[in-house]
Each structure stands twice: as structure tokens, then as C-alpha cells.
Amino acid sequence: MNVQISTDPVMPNYGGACVTELIPTFLEGKKEPSWIPEEVLASRQVVLFVLDGLGWHQLMERISELPTLSQFIGGPITTVAPSTTAAALTSITTGVPPGEHGLVGYRIPIGDKVLNTLRWSTGSGDIQRDIPPSSLQPVQVFGGQWPPVVTRNKFKGSGFSSAHMTDVRLHGYENRDGLVSETVDLIDSGEPFVYVYWDGIDLTGHEFGFSEKYDAELLACDEMFKKIIQQIKPGVALFVTADHGLVSVGGNTISLPKEITSLIDGQSGEPRFRWLHARQGEKERLFEEAEEKFGDVAWIFTMEEIIQQEWLGPKVTDASRSRLGDVAIAAREPVAFLDVAEVMSIELLCRHGSLTNEEMLVPAISFVT
């Protein structure tokens, strides 16, 4: 796969063609975006599928091999910054950018610890009692409604689920067939809106890269949609999007040199959107060193520049601001910046988080039965 390098960061299109607009459109009726077909907006039932990790570019490069998804119509929209699961899924369910809901990345500083938002852990197990999800993410989800959500059984009761899917009706599944069965049953019961989440594409890309297994996973997802379409009545709109795309980094990992580590108290974020937390009085020097060392492979910005340019949205709460670092390293080339405090059980071949086309553009495609 040829990686197309973005000369400039792809900025989230907040208020426009962005994942933040889906719930305000489908559940709250606040908007009727031109990029969502009128046939979808007029449907009595809408099923919103979030396929974790399915970037627009990756989909288009394989669309000719996907007989069902190739019948869907639509185009690309942007996800949020950073282009990572915790920030993006929460932006989808709340309808607001990360600067407002507060889950501003994969790993965020809370006091003197760093919280892994997906595991809801600081390294010693689940800590929902110490860090209640509602205290980190106070924004109402799904427009204050109570829709059915189809997701994996193992996510029930997790801290991240509690943060971005509060007060919903969870319908769990164990495998792809279970997803199909739960979704079809909810459609048949007359639910006007159903939210469905599948993480297989992201998991496969992380572990196996853009390999034959990745292509097989997309084909299996295509078959999944075929089975759903075959079992439901006419007039149901199926809408597919994602939280982010993927970039193949392979073994292109970068450890921070002493010139950088001597100036920081720690790191947060993710390998392709790394926040550096400067020691007192070292912020300016840290920015200069980061620019000198990594300016050829990454965009280097201060926190103030990112807030001013509205990467995280037009509103950044005090709580969100407190969870940012002083200097951000956002990878432009297919590389990943390592943090020794971030332990991974496997080497991730594909990653995400930054603002390249491959990571930022996701599908907004639909099919009406």
C-alpha cells in the first residue's frame, strides 16, 4: 500500500462533514447535511454502523472486491483530532468535539497518573471507583435518548463504555453472527435508530497490517452487511462510518532522545499524536528541540497553537485543557513515537492518531433497503 503523505494536517470539519454531526442528525433532528442522502434522512429506521479503523482510503483501495459495500453511496468525511478511538467514538455518541467532552486521547494525564481511557486503568486494574467515567466525560450522549447499542459483550460495564455510552440499552454479541442476529432483531422490532459497533478491522490492522488477513476481514464485513440486508424489510437505511483510518508504520518506531527526555516530566497521547509535558521553565526549549529532531517527519505544535487552530473544536473546557501536554508531535510520515511507560503486548503494524488523509478521512456511505 502506498502511503500518501499530507503536506498539511487534515483539519476536522467540525460543524460540517464530520462524525460529530451524525447523532445530532439522526437522533436529534437538528440538521439535514447535504452529504447524507435525502432517502436516508426520510427513512423510518436508521442503523448507524461504526466500523472501527475503516479509513476512506483503505476502503476505496479495496472497494472493487467488496460486492455489498460497493453498492453503498456516499463519500468521505472527517473524524476528530486526535484520530483515535477514545476521542472519536465519544465525539460520535455525544455529537461534540474532544475539547468539549474531555476524552482528548488514548492516554490522558489525571493528577499525577496517566489514564489509559480504553482500559480505564493507570496500570493497576480498572479504576472506575477512583476516576468515575462521568466525571471525565460529562456531556450527554445520544441526545439524551435511550437507543439500543449493539456491541461486544465484553465491553459491558467497562469504564470507557460508561463514559461514551451512558444510559443506553446494550445488546451484546460474541461474534459477527451475533452482531447480525442482534441487529436484525432490533430492526424487526421497529426500533427507529440502532447503533452498531464492530472492532474487527482495527484489531486486524493493528496486529497484521494491510495483509491478506486485513483484506479477508473487510470481505467478512461485506458479507456481514449482505446477511443483514437479506433479512430485513424494505425502507431501512444502513449508514456506515468509522472513528479513524490507519497508517502502516511497521517497525518505523522512534524513541525520544535524551535531548527531549531531559526536558519532560512525562508523555501522554498515542504514538502518532504524542503529547510532551515540559518540565517547569523548559517549554520553549522543548518545542525547539522537538522541531529540530522531528520536524522532518512530524508536525510540531504547542498546546496554545492547537487550541487556537481549533484542532480539538471551537470550545476547549478547562478540564480538557488540563489533560493536554505542552508540545504535540503529530506524525506526518508513517512512523510512531514510543513512550517507555506505554506497554504493548504486541508490535502494532498499523497505527493512527495523527492528521494525515489516511487517518482523518472516514466513510459516510449508506444503503436503503
Image (cartoon, helix red, strand yellow):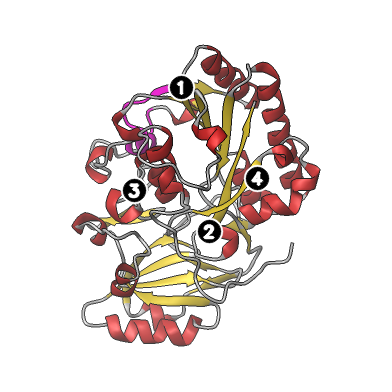
Q: Earlier in the sequence, mark 2 or mark 3?
A: 3
| Tag 4 secondary structure | helix
User: What residue is shown at x 67% (from left), y 30% (from top)?
Assistant: 225
For marks 1 and 3, give the CA distance: 22 Å
Mark 4 or 3, nearer chain start: 3
Q: From the image, tell me which residue sits under label 1.
A: 192
Alpha carbons under labels 4 and 2: distance apart = 19 Å
Q: Name the side, left or right, on which 326 lies relative to 119.
A: left
Counting every numbered tag in the picture gives 4
Q: Residue at x 70, y 52 (%)?
A: 60
The region drawn magenta spans 157-170
Residue type pointed to by label 1: Pro
Residue type marked 4: Thr
Q: Residue at x 32, y 80 (%)?
A: 263
* Helix, strand or loop status at disc 2: helix
Report the amino acid beneath label 2: Met
Q: Nearer the viewer, residue 21 or 194?
A: 21
Q: Eyeballing the image, is 317 above or below 143? A: below
Query: Where does label 4 land, which residue?
Result: 204
Dot 1 or dot 3, earlier in sequence: 3
**Mark 3 sits on what residue?**
96
Look at label 3 and name its amino acid: Val
Q: Which residue is mark 2?
A: 360
